[in-house]
Structure formats: structure tokens, C-alpha cells
């Protein structure tokens, strides 16, 4: 189990320990000056002088051009409770250099600025006692191990930042408590009452670390089967049973991602960039769906792109590879969302639901 951390910074680097340590056997993480890197020390080596700063979590370490830095989650807010677990969103962060009051050049300053921009514009969530990288079902299947060991790497957003810590943790289990998997996405629960029965509704979205990027610059699939901006969204429902006093827990998963073929939009400063389809997508598309089937079983594909104009080539390319795969576990349906639900006729989404049920999709 992870928890809050305290640190002291001085001329020798940055020293971290658990805020609620267990005693003299606790480990101290020392992010030393550039030439020394990360070290594990005994509890007695935590500095007795200097300002002690309490933080919510240590997201990890990064080496830029000149210096090493600690990425710190300073403050958080509670966003939900689920089965006794608490979800938190990171509100404020810090990038702390190992070199106390060091001077940096213009390139290093630019790298720090870009890192700050990413951290500021991102929505990071974690739980000290629940693995948000994994769905409810995947969490049920893993044993009692440190969360970083069973975390789904696809959604372990600070996986790279924790590399040094994970390397030490393989040899020293005391380090487990310093490694806090963080997701980029959304995690929130709300309490409600339905027919006099208390319920909890939860929504968790996990963004994949593979092939993430900005709109227009990250489209389609890569050779390993990863698609642009893949997300897994989980809806969770907890409901009490008044008769048996048991709590029923339900989970429903949806995924989304860029159309899994080779395609791109060439940025040419026009309102709509040129859309270009690549060739020979079939192998990459097959890898993508093989991964999805292994993770989720039968896949029900809902294509919502426009069936005319700018997006038509993507629609046709998608349908072409799905037809070529001819996989009985891949169920494809096209739904012209903009046409069917025009003028805010959202109720017509039922047409799509009915179609999916005919293909075999069930919530049972």
C-alpha cells in the first residue's frame, strides 16, 4: 500500500521517506546529484536539518539535458469512494531539481516549460489502496501484490518516471510503497438513491501511454497494433440488496481509439487538413484486434465517422480491413450518428443499441 511522503532538499540532493513510516527499517530514497542518480538509504540517513515538506505522492524521476528532477504531486482532492477505497485527483505539482539553487541554460528551461505544460494540462488520478490502471474484473484476478507489479502498463502513465524505483523494488520490497501508479483520464463516483436503494455510480477513464498525442498529429495504428489516443472507460455500479444485506457490484467496459488502419491528416494550415490513407494495414490491424480480443473477448465495433465527405476514405478503409479479417469475434456496425441523431434526437441511439443486441452484445 502506498501513502503520503515527506522530503527534504539540500545541497546533496532530495531525500524521500514515507510520511507514516514504520520505524528504523524504513527506506529513504535519495535522488542525488546528476553523477550519482537514485540511491536507497537507511532510515537513519534522512536529514535531521532542513525543511520537511509533506506531499501526496512521488510520481517519479526524469533526466533532462542538464539535471535530474523529481516529479511531485503536492496537493490532491478526493473525487470518489468505492468499496472503502478513495480516489484522488492531482491538483498541484512540482518539478524539483537535485541541484539546489542551480542555474540552467535556455534549452533546459524550454524542456522544463514543456514538462510543466504537460503536467498542468493533464488530469491525473490515483488511489493509495486501489489500482486505477486495472478494471474491476482485472483487479479481482490479481493476487495480493504491490500495485505497480500488477498495474496495466497501458494505463500506467508514470511508468517511465518510476523506472529507477521499480528497478530497486525488485530487490527491496520496502520501495513498493513509494511507487504510486497514476492514470491520465478521469475517476469519480457519486452517491444516489434508486427506488429507496442506495447506489454508487462510478466512471473511470484510462488513457493509454502507447501512441498518445494531439489531434491531427496522432492518427491510425502503428506496426505493433497500438492506435492513436486509445482509452478504456469503465462504468461501475454498486447497489445494496435490502433482502440479503449484500452489495452487488457491476462493471461495464467500453474502449475507443483511432480507426486501426494506416492513415494520417497532413497539417497544411487549412481548416481541414489533407487526409491520406496508407497501404498494407492488414497486419497491423490484425495485431490490434488480436490484442483486443485477448483483453476483452468478442469486440463490438461501432463506427461513427461520416459516410460522406472528408471522412469517407477512413470509413471505407476500416470496413475493408474488417471484411478482410473475417473474424467471428469481431462484430462491426456502422451508425451515422450525425444523420440519425440530428436536431438533438438522442433517443434514436436506441437504433444502435438494438442493432448491437442483434449481433449478440449482452449486458448479462
Image (cartoon, rainbow, N blue to C red):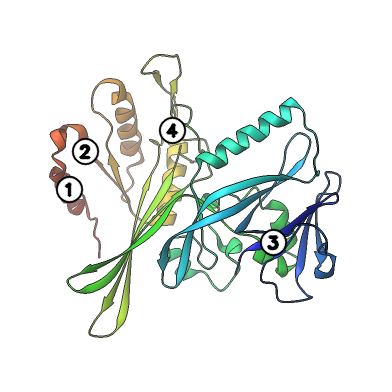
> From the viewer's perspective, is 284 left or right of 66?
left
**Which comes sooner in the sequence, label 4 or label 1?**
4
Give the residue at mark 3.
6
Q: Which residue is depicted at the point 56% across and 38% down?
A: 118
- Say few, some or many: other residues with alpha carbon within 10 Å of mark 3 (under 14 / 14 to 19 / 20 or more): some
| Left or right: residue 53 compared with residue 212 | right
Indicate the quadrant containing the C terminus: top left, top right, bottom left or bottom right.
Answer: bottom left
Specify whether 275 is left or right of 64.
left
Distance from Cα at disc 4 to Cα at disc 1? 26 Å
Which residue is pictured at 26% across the width and 72% down the height?
198
Name which residue lies at 44% across and 26% down: 216
Question: Alpha carbon of mark 4 to alpha carbon of mark 3: how far?
Answer: 43 Å
**Which of 258 and 247 lies nearest the eye of the viewer?**
247
* Mark 2 in CB contact with mark 1 (< 8 angstroms): yes
Q: CA separation, marks 3 and 2?
A: 52 Å
Compute the Cα span from label 2 to label 1.
Answer: 10 Å
Q: State how far apart marks 4 and 2 are (Cα).
A: 20 Å
| Mark 4, secondary structure of its residue | loop
Tag 1 secondary structure: helix
Q: Position of residue 260 (x, y in %)?
A: 41, 36
Question: What residue appears at the point 84 percent right and 69 percent down from the top-left corner?
Answer: 44
Q: CA distance from mark 3 to mark 1?
A: 54 Å
Q: Which residue is labeled 2 in the image?
A: 335
- Residue underneath mark 1: 355
Amino acid at each position: 500500500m502506498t501513502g503520503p511522503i515527506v522530503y527534504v532538499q539540500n545541497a546533496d540532493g532530495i531525500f524521500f521517506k514515507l510520511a507514516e513510516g514504520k520505524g528504523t527499517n524504513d527506506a529513504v530514497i535519495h535522488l542525488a546529484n546528476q553523477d550519482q542518480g537514485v540511491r536507497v538509504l537507511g532510515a537513519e540517513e534522512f536529514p535531521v536539518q532542513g525543511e520537511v515538506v509533506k506531499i501526496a505522492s512521488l510520481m517519479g524521476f526524469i533526466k533532462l539535458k542538464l539535471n535530474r528532477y523529481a516529479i511531485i504531486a503536492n496537493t490532491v482532492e478526493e473525487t470518489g469512494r468505492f468499496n472503502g477505497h478513495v480516489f484522488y485527483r492531482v491538483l498541484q505539482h512540482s518539478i524539483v531539481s537535485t541541484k539546489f539553487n542551480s542555474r540552467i541554460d535556455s534549452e533546459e528551461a524550454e524542456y522544463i516549460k514543456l514538462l510543466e505544460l504537460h503536467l498542468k494540462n493533464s488530469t491525473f488520478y490515483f488511489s493509495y489502496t486501489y489500482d486505477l490502471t486495472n478494471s474491476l474484473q482485472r483487479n479481482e484476478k490479481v493476487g495480493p501484490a504491490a500495485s505497480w507489479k500488477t498495474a496495466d502498463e497501458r494505463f500506467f502513465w508514470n511508468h517511465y518516471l518510476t523506472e529507477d524505483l521499480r528497478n530497486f523494488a525488485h530487490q527491496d520490497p520496502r520501495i513498493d510503497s513509494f511507487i504510486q501508479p497514476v492514470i491520465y483520464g478521469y475517476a469519480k463516483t457519486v452517491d444516489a438513491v434508486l427506488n429507496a436503494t442506495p447506489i454508487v455510480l462510478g466512471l473511470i477513464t484510462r488513457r493509454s501511454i502507447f501512441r498518445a498525442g494531439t489531434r491531427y498529429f496522432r492518427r491510425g495504428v502503428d506496426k505493433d497494433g497500438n492506435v492513436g489516443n486509445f482509452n478504456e472507460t469503465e462504468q461501475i455500479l454498486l447497489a445494496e440488496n435490502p433482502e440479503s444485506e449484500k452489495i452487488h457490484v457491476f462493471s461495464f467496459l467500453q474502449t475507443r481509439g483511432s480507426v486501426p488502419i494506416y492513415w494520417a491528416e497532413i497539417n497544411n494550415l487549412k481548416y481541414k487538413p489533407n487526409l491520406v490513407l496508407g497501404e498494407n494495414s492488414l497486419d497491423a490491424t490484425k495485431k490490434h484486434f488480436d490484442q483486443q480480443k485477448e483483453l476483452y473477448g468478442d469486440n463490438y465495433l461501432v463506427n461513427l465517422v461520416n459516410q460522406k465527405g472528408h471522412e469517407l476514405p477512413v470509413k471505407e478503409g476500416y470496413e475493408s480491413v474488417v471484411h478482410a479479417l473475417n473474424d467471428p469475434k469481431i462484430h462491426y456496425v456502422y451508425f451515422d450518428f450525425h444523420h440519425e441523431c440530428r436536431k438533438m434526437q438522442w433517443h434514436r441511439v436506441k437504433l444502435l443499441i438494438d442493432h448491437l443486441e442483434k449481433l449478440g452484445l449482452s449486458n448479462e
